[in-house]
């Protein structure tokens, strides 16, 4: 399963690393790619739950606009 998460509030490489680490901390996530330019994260894994993905990112201080 693959999901694309649109994120607002990332402004530097530190931001992308924070989002990447937050998502990698979830057991169901096997792969993460975060793009500062495109303001998105692409995650892969089993049984990805939108609410858990959103919560992990928002706990770092960023806003999730859309998950698709």
Image (spheres, grey):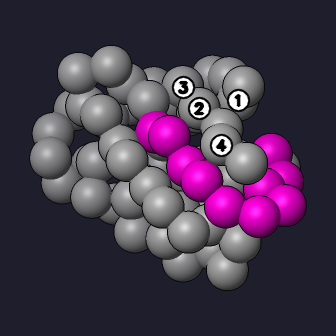
The residue beneath circle 4 is 2
Residue depicted at x 39% and y 59%:
20
* Count of marks overlaid on the render: 4
Q: Is the Cβ of the residue at disc 3 closer than 8 Å to that at disc 1?
A: yes
In what element is the residue under mark 2? Answer: strand
Labels 3, 4: front one: 4
The residue beneath circle 1 is 67
Q: Which of 27/44 is in front? A: 44
Q: Is residue 43 magenta?
A: yes
Tell me where residue 68 sits by quadrant.
top right
Residue depicted at x 73% and y 48%:
1
In what element is the residue under mark 3? Answer: strand
The residue beneath circle 2 is 4
The residue beneath circle 3 is 6
In what element is the residue under mark 4? Answer: strand
CA gap, disc 2 to disc 1? 6 Å
Q: Is the Cβ of the residue at disc 4 closer than 8 Å to that at disc 2?
A: yes
CA gap, disc 4 to disc 1? 10 Å
Q: Is the Cβ of the residue at disc 2 closer than 8 Å to that at disc 1?
A: yes
């Amino acid at each position: 399963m693959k999901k694309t998460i649109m994120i607002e509030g990332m402004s530097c490489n530190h931001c992308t690393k924070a989002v990447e680490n937050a998502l990698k901390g979830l057991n169901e996530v096997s792969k993460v790619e975060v793009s500062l330019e495109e303001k998105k994260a692409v995650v892969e894994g089993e049984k990805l739950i939108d609410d858990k993905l959103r919560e992990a990112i928002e706990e770092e201080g960023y806003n999730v606009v859309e998950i698709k």
